[in-house]
Image (cartoon, grey):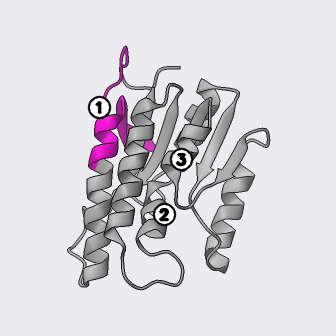
């Protein structure tokens, strides 16, 4: 079962993904894409570490999610695609976006996701429901994030929009009503 959780910032996506991962499997590997780029981000990462069960494996993978997904087994929790796309578009020390490299990584991830035989739960942000950004880099990010979310949703068996900690089913999975299969 491939599950996509999409929603705004602080909508409850990660907490829900952790709860569902714990309900679906006792063996979980979390692929985290965030990097400790500043003190505020380091605090966010530390909070996520405290919230996860201590027996879960954690693999930091800021760039090559497709490869990481192929190398892992069991239930995989990917948190999150939004930071991943930022890492791929603007690696540290660069100003210009490398669209060819990014789109290669995106396509590789989607191929790995489609081929993965165990459960995968993916967290991503919805960034396209606000105003049109006032600069080219922000518009590029919004567009690429939207296209990534579309192909990820198409590759997933079920998709939920999460707001205020509540999941709204957008794409029901097999034998599924309003909560994920266990």
In front: 138, or 104?
Answer: 104
Residue 168 counted in the magenta span: yes
Q: What is the spatial separation of the Cα atoms under label 3 and label 2, in whole angstroms?
A: 17 Å
Q: Is residue 171 left or right of residue 20?
A: left
Q: Quadrant of residue 86?
A: bottom left
Badge nearest the viewer, 3 or 2:
3
| Residue drawn at (74%, 41%) of the image | 53
Q: Does the magenta-highlighted stretch encompass residue 173?
A: yes
Residue 154, by quadrant, is: top left
Residue 175's spot in the image, x, y percent? 37, 14
Residue 125 vs residue 61, the one in the foreground: 61
Count of numbered labels shown in the rendering: 3
Residue under the image location 38 percent in, 64 percent down: 101
Q: Please rate how many residues cluster around mark 2, counting C-alpha atoms within 10 Å: few if below 14, some from 14 to 19, many from 20.
A: some
Q: Which residue is mark 1?
A: 171
In terms of secondary structure, where does tag 2 sit?
A: helix
Name the residue beneath numbered marker 2. Answer: 83
N-terminal label among 3 and 2: 3
Q: CA distance from mark 1 to mark 3?
A: 26 Å
Which residues are the magenta region?
150-177
Residue behind mark 3: 67
Q: Earlier in the sequence, mark 1 or mark 3?
A: 3
How far across and down, in percent of the image, does residue 129 sit?
Answer: 24, 62
Mark 1 crowd level (few <14, some 14–19, many ≥20, 10 Å Cα): some
Instruction: Report how far apart the C-alphas of labels 1 and 2 lie in the structure.
Output: 24 Å
Q: Where's residue 92, x and y in %? A: 54, 79
């Amino acid at each position: 079962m491939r599950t996509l959780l999409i929603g705004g910032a602080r909508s409850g996506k990660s907490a829900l993904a952790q709860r569902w991962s714990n309900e679906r499997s006792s063996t979980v590997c979390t692929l985290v894409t965030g990097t400790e780029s500043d003190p505020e981000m380091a605090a966010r990462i530390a909070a996520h570490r405290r919230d996860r069960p201590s027996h879960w494996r954690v693999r930091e993978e800021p760039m090559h999610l497709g490869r990481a997904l192929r190398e892992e087994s069991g239930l995989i929790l990917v948190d999150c695609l939004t930071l991943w796309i930022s890492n791929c578009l603007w690696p540290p020390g660069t100003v210009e976006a490398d669209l060819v490299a990014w789109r290669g990584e995106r396509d590789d991830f989607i191929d790995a996701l489609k081929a993965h035989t165990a459960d995968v739960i993916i967290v991503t942000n919805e960034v396209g429901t606000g105003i049109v950004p006032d600069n080219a880099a922000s518009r590029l990010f919004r567009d690429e994030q939207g296209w990534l979310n579309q192909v990820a949703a198409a590759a997933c068996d079920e998709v939920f929009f999460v707001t205020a900690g509540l999941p709204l089913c957008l794409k029901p999975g097999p034998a599924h009503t309003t909560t994920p299969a266990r």
